[in-house]
Image (cartoon, coloured by chain):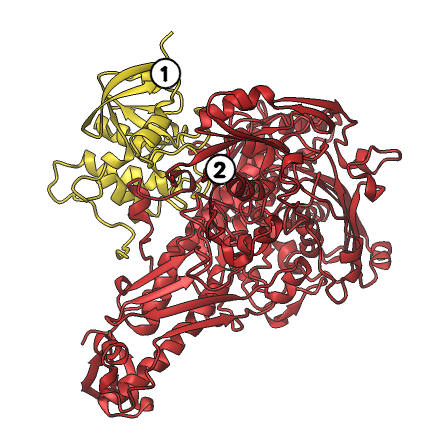
């Protein structure tokens, strides 16, 4: 019999792909029900205004209109979303102090950001719904706009929510060690203020949903393009007064999420409330303009951070004032997530123990910020890594040496970071060493000098990070959530394996990788394993796809469940083969007696024996089940690490930044499918590139968001994205059941910092620091001119 | 003014005669009338390319055309690429190279790339990157898409060689 060849660790082609390649995927807009009507929202054109009156008469008479519904109409039928924090021991003050705001499915009396939904039109099709939307007359009385953090916290600032008495949502301070003394004693201190840009996940598929209500059974079905179907089922029923058992949530193929779809939105509440109200299936597919103004934003803040170091480059202190501009409401359920995370990860993978910060989460008249790939870590890494480079430049150290001096070393693992994160193990030092080799740093410096003389500016950017991924339940408690996963594995009479998880998959190949894991455990072909995801009626409860948690947590639960089923199979086979369970082994689709190749039984026979021919059992009244549901609570934190290295060229004339080459040295422990891992690294890194050089959602002082199309919100294309070399180091997790570490967000985390550092390095002769993202050509050009005007040019 | 118009067209080789509302986008006609939902709406303003189809062999944005503009013409959508249940060479190459993740942009990329392949000319990576710059992908970072298309273009260029059938360059096994 041939040896079983394992699937885990191999570059297995994805089983999802044939349907997606042939146009047979089923995305949210592909769901079509008979009698289905479509919804268009009328949204606020103003950043801040009182709704004086809404005249819907003309809209109601518009062709094909079934209903025109305002906030006042819906208020008795649908409650508002309201994100709250849970009083976790030690963080009770946060839960108590954090402001709460009711975010209605349709605005009541007042709008607080441009794009807030005000009226819902339900019509026979979307064309007719949009016709009617134009006929709704809303009389707005403009209110003063709070356009940024400084305005929001200023004296006599207009208030977004009067009952708060201020615009500060949450302030939190952290202190460890003696930063004051560290700064007093340090020979080198550098302080900078950084502004980070408002970005958005911008999945190619926008948000959307289809809702259907059965007035006789009083049950609702809700198809939604979401990363968190079970959380949708947990939250929505209460808001519209139906029992949780009456809401069936289905996530079809999800066309990208990146965190933007890991939240619950007012539109979701409106959709199911309208389906119930009208007794008709309704569909809403967000258009791109709505997506840019009303799906969650991320990353905007102003951060004044100071770093202290010794002459040898040892970093001895870090302190900061972190202001997060989170918009008009707290996104649900992870409002203030980004602000809490940024300060927590600002010290990065470095041995910094004197650290303090104050975080301010501030409300403004902008769309709410929510989680987006990396959540806080992209900003923290950009700031931290830029300051590390500033210190290196001050001390004439190279960017590799200063990192090697400060990174957590192998012998220090497990290392407890200054903010209490435990870094299990990893390859921090090796990953940087590999970048040095790849760059040939000495050779590069020589070349850089020569090219500068020719007027060509090239630079090196390095960025190191350790990620807090796949957290366990204690981490999520603050948000009234948990971190476990549950998976069901069932065997059929013909030994086919069905795996059921409540995870939704926005593109990371979960069906493929779970099948790899299961096939390996049972030594069967992957074809025998089918994986069902994202449907709340045929899956156990799940916390969903976010926080890079799938393979660590869901993969762990799957392993536990399949091992339970294996125990049952062995019990049956022992009976069949008249052998002891302890003498049996799985081998290539069979169970056999160890050392006796001729004594074996095919799994099909075992399953048939167990499930169908119970009459052959010694005691046919107690059949054995070949199914198991198991829950897995992961370790408190999974800590993958990586170092990015980039070579950029800056055009002095145009300010354009070009990526010449890019390397990611990546360590996420054991890999189930390196091909998928690489896809996540490259895709994430290019999102980081976009965040670094072109993406921005700018608001005017009047509260108008000015990037309303993909001509304005510019993301990387085939022309502007580099090829990215990937080197894997595998330091398996000893804590996670399967040796894996969470991955998928790191590219977006390190991308902006690597590129910002590269630009500063290319312009180091001008003493330029990159303190604002995105690094647009205009900004780079301005930096060059300013530096030249200041006469900072060195040889 | 008439609000509907009768159009006659061939989509993926099948003839249709339909009366359409004159303002119906070609995109919506394909999706809602013909139920060919592989053509996706990503922006509806002509930037993202997810709705790309071939009109008489030329790539067009179906969100920027009205169905009423199409008469006596031939449209190819992503559903028309695989023949007799067999993935095309390009589709296979995308599969082998992991050139898709969520798959939402994929039909648009396939159609734009198919047009290039149909020209039968070899092009450089730089030219290819220029040619595909009108299609947006948010998942892959593009590298594997470029690799997938380049492989088909180069195999086609060498097609006089009987040994040049597409090789699974990733060494991947089919799942």
Residue A495 as seen in the image, left or right of residue A490: left
Quick check: A748 above or below A195? below
Mark yes or no: residue A541 visible.
Answer: yes
Helix, strand or loop under label 1 = loop
Helix, strand or loop under label 2 = loop
Q: Do the residues labelled 2 and 1 touch (CB within 8 Å)?
A: no
Give the residue drawn at x 35%, y 10%: B2
Give the letter of the red chain: A
Give me the chain letter of mark 1. Answer: B
- Name the residue beneath numbered marker 2: A206
Quick check: A366 above or below A391? above
Provide residue A3's location: percent of width, then percent of height: 23, 74
Residue A773 as seen in the image, left or right of residue B94: right
Quick check: A283 above or below A743? above
Q: Which residue lies furthest to the top in this view?
A: B1
- Name the residue beneath numbered marker 1: B22
């Amino acid at each position: 019999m041939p040896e079983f060849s394992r699937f885990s660790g191999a570059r297995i082609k994805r089983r999802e792909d044939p349907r997606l390649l042939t146009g047979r995927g089923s995305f949210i807009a592909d769901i079509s029900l008979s009698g289905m009507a479509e919804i268009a929202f009328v949204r606020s054109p103003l950043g801040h205004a009182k709704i004086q009156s809404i005249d819907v008469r003309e809209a109601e008479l518009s062709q094909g209109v079934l209903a025109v519904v305002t906030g006042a109409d819906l208020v008795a039928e649908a409650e508002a979303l309201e994100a709250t924090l849970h009083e976790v021991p030690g963080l009770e003050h946060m839960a108590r102090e954090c402001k709460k705001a009711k975010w209605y499915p349709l605005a009541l009396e007042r709008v607080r950001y441009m794009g807030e939904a005000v009226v819902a039109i339900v019509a026979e099709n979307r064309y007719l719904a949009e016709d009617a939307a134009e006929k709704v007359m809303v009389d707005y009385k403009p209110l003063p706009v709070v356009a940024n953090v400084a305005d929001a916290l200023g004296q006599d600032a207009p208030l977004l929510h009067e009952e708060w008495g201020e615009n500060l949502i949450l302030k939190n301070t952290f202190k460890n060690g003696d930063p004051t003394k560290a700064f007093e004693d340090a020979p080198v201190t550098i302080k900078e203020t950084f502004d980070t840009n408002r970005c958005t996940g911008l999945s190619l598929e926008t948000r959307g949903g289809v809702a259907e209500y059965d007035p006789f059974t009083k049950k609702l079905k809700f198809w939604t393009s979401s990363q968190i179907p079970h959380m949708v089922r947990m939250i929505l029923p209460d808001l519209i007064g139906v029992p949780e058992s009456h809401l069936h949530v289905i996530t079809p193929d999800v066309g990208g999420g990146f965190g933007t779809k890991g939240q619950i939105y007012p539109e979701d509440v409106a959709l199911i409330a309208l389906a119930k109200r009208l007794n008709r299936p309704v569909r809403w597919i967000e258009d791109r303009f709505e997506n840019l103004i009303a799906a969650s934003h991320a990353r905007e803040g102003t951060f004044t951070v100071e770093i202290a170091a010794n002459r040898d480059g040892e970093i001895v202190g870090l302190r900061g004032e972190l202001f997060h501009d989170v918009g008009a409401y707290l996104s649900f359920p992870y409002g203030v997530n980004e602000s809490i995370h940024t300060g927590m990860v600002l010290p990065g993978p470095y041995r910094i123990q004197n650290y303090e910060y104050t975080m301010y989460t501030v409300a403004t008249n902008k769309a709410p910020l929510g989680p987006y790939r990396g959540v806080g870590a992209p900003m923290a890494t950009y700031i931290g890594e830029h300051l590390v480079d500033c210190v290196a430049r001050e001390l004439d150290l190279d960017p590799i040496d200063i990192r090697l001096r400060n990174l957590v070393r192998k012998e220090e693992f497990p290392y407890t970071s200054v903010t209490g994160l435990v870094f299990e193990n990893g390859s921090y030092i090796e990953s940087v060493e590999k970048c040095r080799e790849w760059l040939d740093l000495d050779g590069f410096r020589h070349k850089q000098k020569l090219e500068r003389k020719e007027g060509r500016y090239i630079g090196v950017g390095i960025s190191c990070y350790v990620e807090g991924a796949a957290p366990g339940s204690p981490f999520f408690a603050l948000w009234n959530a948990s971190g476990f996963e549950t998976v069901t594995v069932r065997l059929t009479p013909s030994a086919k394996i069905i795996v059921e998880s409540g995870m939704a998959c926005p593109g990371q190949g979960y069906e493929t990788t779970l099948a790899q894991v299961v096939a390996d455990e049972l030594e069967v072909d992957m074809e025998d394993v089918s994986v069902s995801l994202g449907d709340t009626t045929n899956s156990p409860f799940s916390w969903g796809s976010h926080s890079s948690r799938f393979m660590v947590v869901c993969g762990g639960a799957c392993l536990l469940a399949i091992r339970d089923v294996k125990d049952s199979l062995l019990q049956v086979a022992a009976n069949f083969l008249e052998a002891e369970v302890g003498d049996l082994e799985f081998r290539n689709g069979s169970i056999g007696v160890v050392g006796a190749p001729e004594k074996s039984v095919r799994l099909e026979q075992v399953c048939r024996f167990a499930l169908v021919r119970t009459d052959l059992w010694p005691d046919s009244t107690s059949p054995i089940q070949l199914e198991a549901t198991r829950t897995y609570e992961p370790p408190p934190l999974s800590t993958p690490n990586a170092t990015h290295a980039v070579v950029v060229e800056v055009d002095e004339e145009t300010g354009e930044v070009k990526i010449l080459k890019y390397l990611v040295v990546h360590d996420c422990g054991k890999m189930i499918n390196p091909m998928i891992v690489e896809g996540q690294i490259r895709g994430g890194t290019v999102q980081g590139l976009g965040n670094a050089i072109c993406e921005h959602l700018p608001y005017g002082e009047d509260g108008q968001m000015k990037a309303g199309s993909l001509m304005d919100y510019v993301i990387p294309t085939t022309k502007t994205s580099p090829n990215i070399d990937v080197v894997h180091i595998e330091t398996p997790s000893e804590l996670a059941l399967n040796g894996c570490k969470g991955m998928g967000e790191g590219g977006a985390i390190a991308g902006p910092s690597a590129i910002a550092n590269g630009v500063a390095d290319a312009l180091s002769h001008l003493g330029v620091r990159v303190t604002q993202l995105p690094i647009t050509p205009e900004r780079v050009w301005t930096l060059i001119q300013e530096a030249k005007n200041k006469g900072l040019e060195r040889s | 003014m008439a609000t509907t118009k009768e159009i006659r067209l061939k989509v993926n080789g099948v003839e249709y005669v339909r009366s359409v509302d004159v303002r119906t986008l070609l995109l919506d006609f394909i999706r809602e009338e013909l139920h060919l939902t592989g053509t996706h709406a990503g922006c509806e303003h002509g930037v993202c390319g997810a709705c790309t189809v071939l009109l008489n062999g030329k790539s067009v944005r179906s969100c920027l055309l009205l169905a009423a503009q199409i008469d006596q013409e031939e449209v190819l959508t992503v559903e028309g690429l695989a023949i007799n249940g067999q993935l095309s060479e390009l589709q296979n190459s995308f599969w082998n190279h992991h050139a898709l993740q969520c798959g939402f942009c994929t039909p648009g990329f396939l159609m734009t790339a198919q047009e290039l392949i149909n020209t039968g000319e070899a092009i450089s990576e730089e030219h290819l990157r220029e040619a595909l710059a009108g299609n947006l992908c948010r998942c892959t970072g593009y590298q594997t898409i470029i690799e997938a298309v380049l492989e088909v273009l180069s195999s086609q260029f060498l097609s006089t060689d009987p040994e040049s059938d597409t090789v699974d360059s990733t060494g991947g096994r089919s799942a």
